[in-house]
Image (tube, rainbow, N blue to C red):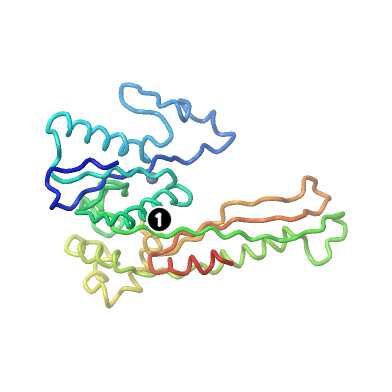
Amino acid sequence: MTIPGSDPTLEAVQLMAHQDVVPVVPGTEDLWEHDAFCGFLDDEYIWGRGALDIKDMLMGELEAVDYLIAHHGTPRRSVHLAFGEDEEVTSQGATRLAEEMLHRGIRLAWLLDEGTTTMYDGAAYGAPGTTVSDICISQKGYLDVRLSAHGEGGHSSNPFGGTSLERLCRALARVAAKKPAPRLTPIIGDTFRTLAPHVTEEPFRALVADVDAHADELAAVAAETRELFPFVATTVAITQLEGGSTSPNVMPGDVSATINLRLLPRDVHRRHALARR
Ligand SMILES: [Zn+2]
């Protein structure tokens, strides 16, 4: 949706938020204090899946635009409202929005979309007591890899050659043992450079004195913390296992596993090559 601005010489701005949320894991519905999709409102909180990711932003932007038009009339810059429908899994909403923007030749002064935690303590960067707020200018890539092993089934008294599940587990173990090495991207390098004057704790303090010279060491140290690990590594998460035998003494048929990867920016170009296989 486009709200035309009064000054067509100004570049437009774009307000974004995705509309989808992740599902509730079947069987865990009862763990919710209020039904996951009821949007229950008590005196303090809105209870519901997606309230923070990212319906708060979606509704906030719509309310803000509504308020703007009601109280100030036409804005000077054109405002695009662009709400994708599939962010959590395959980002198809954002992909189509980007294609449409390209098609229409839309150029923006800026856009506002979901980011990370608004403000947090800089302890993870060795700068405790410093309040950090991120401006998100990049997103990691996404890749699902599915491994399958074929099994003939049969009685478990003769598992000659190993069961399909055994072969799959061996493959998964090899994947888990050979994870991508941490790497300092230009963006995270800039983050350390910006925070350098506030960094008081070792080993970060010595390393941020010259980020370029210590890029590999910084990446290695960051990868050892839960907070910074995803920023410096292509992550590999083995998330799903399908198949397996229903009986302990029967060998499994076909089994498969899914590995979910979140790719560092410069690893993304490999995604398409892999996806074609
Ligand atoms: Zn989100």
Query: Is residue 80 shown left or right of residue 179?
Result: left
Is residue 160 positioned above or below 44 on the image? Answer: below
Q: Is residue 124 above or below residue 171?
A: above
Label 1 sits on residue: 226
Ligand 1 within 8 Å of disc 1? The answer is no
Regarding mark 1 in the picture, which secondary structure is present there? loop
- Give ligand 1's quarter of the image: top left
Q: Quadrant of the C terminus?
A: bottom right
Q: Position of residue 18 (x, y in %)?
A: 38, 43
Front residue of this view, candidates 36 and 1: 1
| Quarter of the image with the N terminus in it | top left
Residue in view at x 32 percent, y 59 percent = 138
| Residue 152 locus on image (x, y percent) | 82, 58
**39 vs 24: above or below:** above
When asked about the image quadrant of residue 41, the answer is: top left
Q: Residues within 10 Å of mark 1 (few under 14, many from 20)?
A: few
Give above or below for 237 relative to 49. below
How many marks are shown on the rendered structure?
1
From the viewer's side, name the closer residue of 84 and 191. 84
169 or 78, nearer to the observer: 78
Q: Residue furthest bottom?
A: 213
